[in-house]
Amino acid sequence: MLLLHNTLAQSAAPIIHDPVLIKEKGTYYLFATGQGIAVMSSKDLTTWKTEAPVFNQPPAWAVKAVPTFTGHIWAPDISYHHGKYYLYYSVSAFGKNTSCIGLATTPTLDPHDPNFKWTDHGLVIQSFPGKTNWNAIDPNLIIDKQGKAYLSFGSFWDGLKLVRLNDDATAVDEDLTHIPTIASRKTNPADPNPPAIEDNPRDAGGNAIEAPFIYKHKNYYYLFASIDYCCKGPRSTYKMIVGRSRDIRGPYLDDNNRDMARGGGKMVLAGDANWHGVGHNAVFKDGKDEYLVFHGYDAHDQGKPKLHIETITWDKDGWPILRK
């Protein structure tokens, strides 16, 4: 297990939750949880500039769908698709599956480009308490070998889900009552959701898995996920796991051939003496370099969530490891 460094540079890293990263014309753009969706830019992945948020006021459709929503948007996902940048995002009541995933697009990420303009396409997926045993948060777009778009998403409840999208990736293209569970902490899918522990929200239960990210590497799709608990500062226990499949719909198996839908998952990274918990990762490829992008709770700074960008390599069996 890699012991994460705690250099002065890392201690001064941006305070951020749920980061995703993309590059356009020599500039890196980081999107993260925040009021209106937090945005930062960098030329070197070290020095970051705060940009204007995606939304300067809460989307009207989201306020109507989630009455407690005041503009703090969770867990965005950024990708380039069909000549535009696609930004999926989460709107939710905390600890409940009163949740929605929305989509905004722009032809460029450069705020100085005259073509820069975010267009909100509104609701993509919605979950409802007592109706859907899944939570419409933490979206991630993946395109399969045939060019079909899929969205992985979810948190707690029955686990992580995968749904096929339409050709322009703006809407669901299959029956939401029959979408597969691709990862869960439950070893038996027929078991009820485990109860919440400690002071965690009762409605969310204890199936502590969230933040799916599917990444294509060689002949496999790799499903990354975060387990245990974020957002608790020094009490955070976040960890990252991974499984892989040759089929985008799974099953995603770990290095012991355990199905992630039945409690499997190979450990990628856990907290250590310097970081209480680490998780909610994305994977970013920049030329030949591949990076794991995530946040960790700094044990030397009151458990504040800070940005990590670590280089990924691959072992002889094709599993991702972080370079020491």
Image (cartoon, helix red, strand yellow):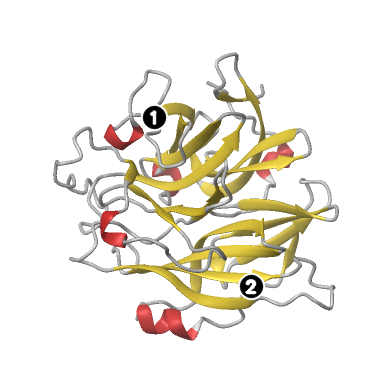
- In the displayed structure, would residue 140 be above or below residue 127? above
Give the image quarter of residue 62: bottom left
Q: Is residue 172 visible?
A: yes
Residue picked out by circle 1: 265
**Residue under the point 48% across and 38% down:** 224
**Residue under the point 31% across and 61% down:** 176
Cα separation between marks 2 and 1? 34 Å
Query: In which quadrant of the rendered image does the C terminus lie?
Result: top right
- In the displayed structure, would residue 309 be above or below residue 55? above
Q: Residues within 10 Å of mark 1 (few under 14, many from 20)?
A: many
Residue 303 rendering spot, x and y as whole percentages: 50, 46
Give the image quarter of residue 63: bottom left
Nearer-the-camera pick, 164 or 52: 164
Nearer-the-camera pick, 48 or 212: 212
Residue 290 rendering spot, x and y as whole percentages: 69, 35
Nearer-the-camera pick, 214 or 163: 163
Is residue 265 toward the left or the right of residue 280 in the image?
Answer: left
Residue 82, label in figure = none
Labels 2 & 1 near each other (Cβ < 8 A): no
Give SS at disc 2: loop
Amino acid at the residue labelled 2: Val
Q: Nearer the viewer, mark 2 or mark 1?
A: 1
Is residue 92 toward the left or the right of residue 166 in the image?
Answer: left
**Residue under the point 47% across and 38% down:** 223
Q: Residue furthest top?
A: 316
- In the displayed structure, would residue 100 be above or below residue 163? below
Residue picked out by circle 2: 54
Q: Residue furthest front?
A: 146
Amino acid at the residue labelled 1: Gly
